[in-house]
Image (cartoon, grey):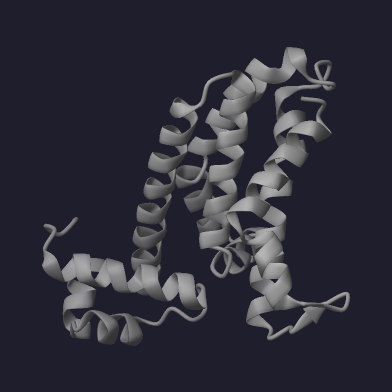
Amino acid sequence: MARPASGTDIKLMAAGRKLLLEKGITGLSVREACREAGVNTGMFHYYFGSKEEFLQAVLKEMYAGFMLNFKAGVSAAGTPRQKLKCALVELGRFALDVRKAMPMFFADMIYGKKEAFAFFSGNFTEHVRHLAALAEECRPASALKGRSVPFLVASLVPVMIFPMLAGGIVERNGVKSLGGVPLSKLREEIFSEEGIAERAEIALRGIGL
């Protein structure tokens, strides 16, 4: 049964979000979250029961925040193309935020962990429905108007997500440069607002919009 909200669980959630963004799923420990929040482990288990429940709660909260920004960005845009671009930009920003956490989550799904897939499909798909609706609206004007909406979405989304996930992986493994380019320089290009917006534009031009 869900426990009533209090200042304690709010502190734990904030600590969990901070640690998740800094260290990823494997680096998020219950003891460190409690220490960061100034809460004893007994209270942690009172509110969340297990690390898995805690992790799911933190991820759901982060996704809810992403969806608020996603919908606000899209609603503020004008043309269907502008709305789709705003949606892609918000997706890129979210991928940047969770780049250290998502590789392990995707790995769990790839290796057939049904719990991870069930959580992802039940909690992280709302933006896909919105992207599909926007792609459908833009499809008649695209070079891929004869293709299905899932094909369009599959052509757009990886451009926004993969560079962030790859960046998170190389960061965690201590890579200093790629192709002779310092990682610090790549961060400026890939992780910046300008870089995210440029990739959204590239993705749209790639489907002829």
Seen in the picture, residue 24 relative to 61 is either above or below; the reply is below
Q: Position of residue 53 (x, y in %)?
A: 35, 64
Q: Residue at x 50, y 46 (%)?
A: 124
Relative horizontal placement of residue 10, taking residue 98 as reference (left or right): left
Q: Within the image, what quadrant is residue 72 found in?
A: top left
Q: Is residue 49 visible?
A: no
Q: Position of residue 68 (x, y in %)?
A: 38, 40
Horizontal arrangement in the rendering, residue 193 relative to residue 44 (left or right): right
Quarter of the rendering occupied by the C terminus: top right
**Quadrant hosting residue 45:** bottom left
Q: How many marks?
A: 0
| Image position of 67 (left or right of 165) | left
Which residue, as the protein is rendered here, is positioned at the far right? 179
Quarter of the view holding residue 154: top right
Q: Position of residue 109 (x, y in %)?
A: 63, 58
Q: Is 6 placed left or right of 166 in the picture?
A: left
* In the foreground, 18 or 86: 86
- Whether residue 98 can be seen here: yes
Q: Is residue 157 above or below residue 23?
A: above
The residue positioned 52% from the left and 40% from the top of the image is 125
